[in-house]
Amino acid sequence: MLKLVSVSKGYVDGGEFHPVLQGADLTIQSGEQIALMGESGAGKSTLLNLIAGLDVLDSGEIWYGDYAMHDFKENNRTEYRRNHIGHVFQQYNLLTTLNVADNIRFCRQLKGLPENTQLWRQILSALDLMPLLGRYPEELSGGQQQRAAIARALYMEPKILLADEPPVAWMRRMQKR
């Protein structure tokens, strides 16, 4: 279970504080899927970054099971991300020096997991990535890069999958498989 209690986060810009989230509460049960919807600038990406441990909240609490994430130091947040989070960013964050296959495998290798041939084939098939495995990010369209980023996150076998502006059609297709 993931639970956010009175979470607040803001940023300083030009010496002025701008609140993005104020007193946000959210509970997500294990196995539950949710969609955060709102206008640009509403704080969706900020909330995902807090859940992923990429940012530190200003006040409130974030719980992952019995773990008090709001008390985590940077090394704890890094370990939490590596072991529990799959994240598909808006900008995809594919490594330009790695081809698609190596980009997909990269985070799984960092996590120390062995190859999973069945899962590999299932993800590549569902996302139509087989013909693109030897290509590099700059050789791909935006949609192809996004699918590679989704595959990378799924291949990590995360306990929590966060997708910032995912393509709905692809997420539905993966859910069916």
Image (tube, helix red, strand yellow):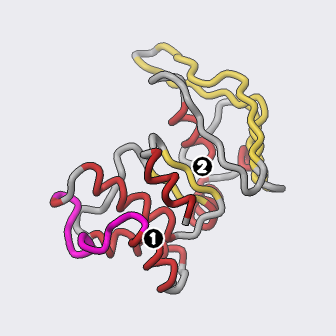
According to the picture, the residue beneath numbered tag 2 turns out to be 53
Q: Position of residue 72 (x, y in %)?
A: 69, 51
Q: Which mark is residue 170?
A: none
**Residue on which the image places disc 1:** 123
Q: Is residue 143 above or below residue 131?
A: above
Q: Position of residue 113 (x, y in %)?
A: 55, 81
Secondary structure found at label 2: loop
Sequence-earlier tag: 2 or 1: 2
- List x then y, in percent, for residue 75: 60, 60
Residue type indicated by callout 1: Ile
Q: Quadrant of residue 81?
A: bottom right
Residue 115, how many percent across, how many down?
Answer: 48, 85
Nearer to us in this view, 100 or 69: 100
Q: Is 108 a magenta residue? A: no
User: Where's the C terminus, which quadrant?
Assistant: bottom right
Front residue of 103 and 35 = 35
Q: Is residue 3 left or right of residue 36?
A: right
2 and 1 marks in contact (CB < 8 Å) = no
Q: CA distance from mark 2 to mark 1?
A: 26 Å
- Number of numbered discs visible in the structure rendering: 2
132 is within the stretch colored magenta: yes
Residue furthest out toward the top: 16
Mark 1 Cα shell of 10 Å, populated few (<14), some (14-19), many (≥20): many
In this picture, which residue range is highlighted in magenta? 126-138
Residue drawn where x is 33% and y is 75% of the image:
102
Closest to the observer, 132 or 24: 132
Name the residue at 45% across, 40% down: 165
- Residue 107 in the figure: left or right of residue 161: left
Q: Give the amino acid type for the residue marked by disc 2 in the picture.
A: Gly
